[in-house]
Image: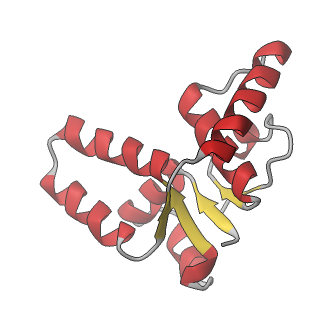
Amino acid sequence: MKYLLDTDTVSFALRGHGEVGAGIRARKPSDLAVSAITVAELRYGADRKGSRKLHALIDTFMGAVDVVSFDQLAAVDFGRIGSILAERGTPIGEFDVLIAAHAVALRCTLVTNNVRHFSKVPGLSVENWA
């Protein structure tokens, strides 16, 4: 895998916004993945909205990409990255640190619409397909 899709990127794809769909179609499915943390955020949003349609879209999307479990290596990177950001006074939020740490642990590029936000994370490669 080469790319980990951030929650906002998947949301853009589900809504058909921007060029995210084209970016996804331009790559091999084996080059794309989604963190289990992203799935959790998407499911939370769908539950909060009470949207069966959104859950169905998430189901379809997740059937087309690999969902990667958050493991011990990612947990170690989460602690390290979160600590660095806190010491610098540049926190980005725990869920975003979890996703960033997961991308670092997997040694892949995080695809996000929030490049400025995630560029604060040391050792993280980011791209924007929107």
Residue in view at x 78 percent, y 23 percent: 85
Q: In terms of image quadrants, where is residue 50?
A: top left
Q: Which residue is most to the front?
A: 72
Q: Is residue 110 above or below residue 22?
A: above
Q: Position of residue 53 (x, y in %)?
A: 17, 59
Residue in view at x 75 percent, y 50 percent: 104
Quadrant of the frame with the C terminus: bottom right
Q: Position of residue 33 (x, y in %)?
A: 55, 66
Asked if one can make out residue 99 in the rendered structure from this viewpoint, the answer is yes
Q: Position of residue 15 (x, y in %)?
A: 37, 61
Q: Position of residue 79 (x, y in %)?
A: 70, 28
Front-lying residue, 59 or 118 = 59
Residue in view at x 54 percent, y 48 percent: 70
Asked if one can make out residue 19 in the rendered structure from this viewpoint, the answer is no
Front-lying residue, 79 or 49 = 79
Quadrant of the frame with the N terminus: bottom right
Residue in view at x 41 percent, y 66 percent: 16
Front-lying residue, 35 or 111 = 35
Q: Is residue 72 above or below residue 14?
A: above
